[in-house]
Amino acid sequence: MTTSTEKKSHRLDFLKEEIQRLKDEHLYQALQPFEGPQDAEISMNGRQILNFSSNNYLGLANHPKLIEAAIQATRELGVGAGAVRTIIGTMGIHEQLEEKLARFKHCEATLVLQSGFTANMAAIPPIMGEGDVIISDALNHASIIDAVRLSRGASKDIFAHSDMNALESVLKKHKTARRKLIVTDGVFSMDGDIAKLPEIVALAEQYNAIVMVDDAHGSGVLGSHGRGTVDHFGLHDQVDIVVGTMSKALGSMGGYVASTQAMREIMVNKARPLLFSTPHPPSVVAACLAAIELLEADDALIQKLWYNTRYFKAGMKSIGLPIDSETPLCPVIVGTSEKAQKLSQRLLEEGIYGRAIVFPTVAADKARVRIIINACHTQAHLDRCIEAFEKIGKELDLLRR
Ligand SMILES: *Cc1c(COP(=O)(O)O)cnc(C)c1O
């Protein structure tokens, strides 16, 4: 007699073939846990490693002020929201965060979601439907792509990455659409380049399109006090919808949609991540509030982040591995996924954690190690990273000089 567990594993055996295929093609991902908090120096299997892959740009993930705020909110308000927002899950502290974010982002109103991912799910499907077209940059984040897929009835059109002529032809092609939405990452999450927002808003004006920017990697990094890409270009009045995350530079977790009061009300009524999933516990909300207070008070961490970024890029250029990006997000593009995995593995042997990013996250011939600089890296950390790249770059014949 077979037990039910045996039967189940047998029925799922086809998955093992798929796993083998991923391994054969150097696309297999294994999780890599570390001990202790998220920081510039981490411990992995008992070894000290320098962390060059997190999105913790400002080091807030382990900041005493955020930790204290989370503990205090937990003591006062408990550990759970208890229901979805529209039933009885909207606590005072949720709206406090939304009001603070609206002031910080210079917009009428915001809505906070569980993550940046769900913020895109909340923003796009409720406003785009039959007769509408969503116009999306080819390198937009997966959560935008999925949100577009969930916008039933709306058609979509993709324009070549940051190619304004391509964007204009697409806008022309859809002149008769009921509504047009141009959606773009603010900072592109795999290349670290900044969207051409001044040109995009000019085209949007000309062709009467709504503009939405997903600023996950720009929040806390670009603009005055980390207000993001829209602030960096001074375009607050010309971008209609901004999605941001509090899971990266802001150190904790959560996404938000910053727009008008009407946009907020429509999402409260129609956004499925809000209607059918519970919001953050008070600890997370309080940590986000504390992060925004820190940003408002002082931009020393952002200055340090950019100082470190310039130092690192100059060092990489001098060894013959120039980084083509405009932000602290530094892709080291090597070509095949096999080469990227090899580079990542050799870096780890040298005590540097730099994650390989392969297909389908990036194009198959543009596999890379994505280095992300943060404000907690010391000069010694940055030097060790550059030295490791120089040593391994020679071994793998990557240096261009
Ligand atoms: C990381 C990222 C997200 C997802 O944010 P989370 O808060 O981690 O869910 C969405 N959009 C872009 C462009 C991102 O880089």
Image (cartoon, rainbow, N blue to C red):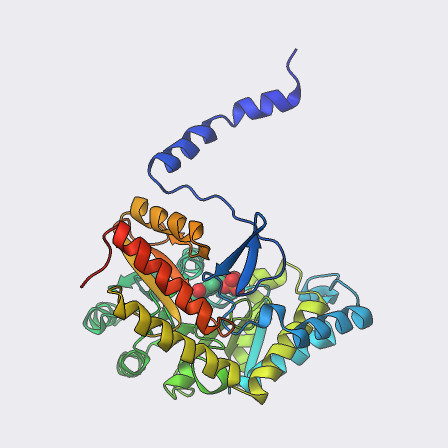
Q: Quadrant of residue 195?
A: bottom left
Say which of 312 and 77 sits in front.
312
The answer to whether one can see residue 225 in this image is yes
Left or right of 293, for residue 356: left
- Res. 130 in view: no
Q: As displayed, is residue 366 above or below residue 316?
A: above
Residue at position x 34%, y 59% in the image: 389
Residue at coordinates 39% horizontally, 58% vertically from top-left? Answer: 145
Q: Quadrant for the N terminus, please.
A: top right
Task: Name the residue rendered at 73%, 77% in the picture.
Answer: 92
- Residue 187 screen position, x and y as percent: 38, 71
Indicate whether 346 appears above or below 257. Answer: above
Residue 333, image x, y percentages? 29, 58
Q: Residue at x 45, y 70 (%)?
A: 380
> Residue 142: x and y, percent?
41, 57
> Where is the C terminus found, in terms of image quarters?
bottom left
Relative to 369, is 113 on the left or the right?
A: right
